Amino acid sequence: MAILTPYVTFRGNCREAMIFYKDSFGGELTFQTVGETPSDIRYPPGTEDQIMHATLIIGDIIIMASDMISRAGFTLGTNISLSLTCDSLEQIERIFFSLSMGGNIKDQLSRRPWGAFFGVITDRFGITWMLSYDAGYT
């Protein structure tokens, strides 16, 4: 089965964002800075501490990120929505609350006609999260 792995590019605050996500979801977080990258490519002075690659592993979920902006440039939140299906009502409530800190609730967490609890948040880093927990119709 294919696994969707979102890769998010930040504008110099990748470390802060990924620590925020680790605090929200738990999991194992690793960073590789530009200065730690084994490469013949030389980056501009002052970028040594920027994140070349970060990985947050939360069970079967993997979120990868970087401070490395493509040649196309950087546009905050362009075409990025991350859908997270939670395992319990407690989990979705905890994560929804955590991600909403400093962010903007687009669609309040509530039970929907299809039986799931669902809500949408744009977090303080401009990333839109669609959270869902399938509670059934009981």
Image: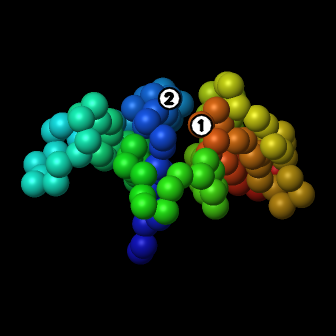
Q: Amino acid at mark 1?
A: Phe
Do the numbered discs 1 and 2 sit on residues whose CB atoms are within 8 Å? Answer: yes
The answer to whether residue 91 is above or below residue 127 is above
Spatial CA distance of label 1 from label 2 is 10 Å
Q: Earlier in the sequence, mark 1 or mark 2?
A: 2
Residue 94 percent across, percent down from the top left: 64, 30
Q: For the residue carrying disc 2, how many other residues have a C-alpha within 10 Å: few (<14), some (14-19), or many (20+)?
A: some
Mark 1: secondary structure? loop
Q: How many marks?
A: 2
According to the picture, the residue beneath numbered tag 1 turns out to be 125
Q: Relative to residue 47, is residue 86 depicted above or below? A: below
Q: For numbered disc 2, what is the local secondary structure?
A: helix
Specify few, some or many for label 1: CA neighbours under 10 Å numbering under 14, 14-19, or 20 or more: some
Q: Residue furthest bottom?
A: 1
Front residue (pair 7, 49): 49
Pointer 2 residue: 20
Relative horizontal placement of residue 42, taking residue 129 as reference (left or right): left
* Residue 6 percent location from the top left of the image: 48, 57
Residue 28 relative to residue 70: left or right? left
Q: Is residue 79 above or below residue 107?
A: below
Instruction: Give percent across and percent down for residue 73.
Output: 50, 56
Q: Is residue 103 left or right of residue 105?
A: left
Q: Nearer the viewer, residue 14 or 60?
A: 14
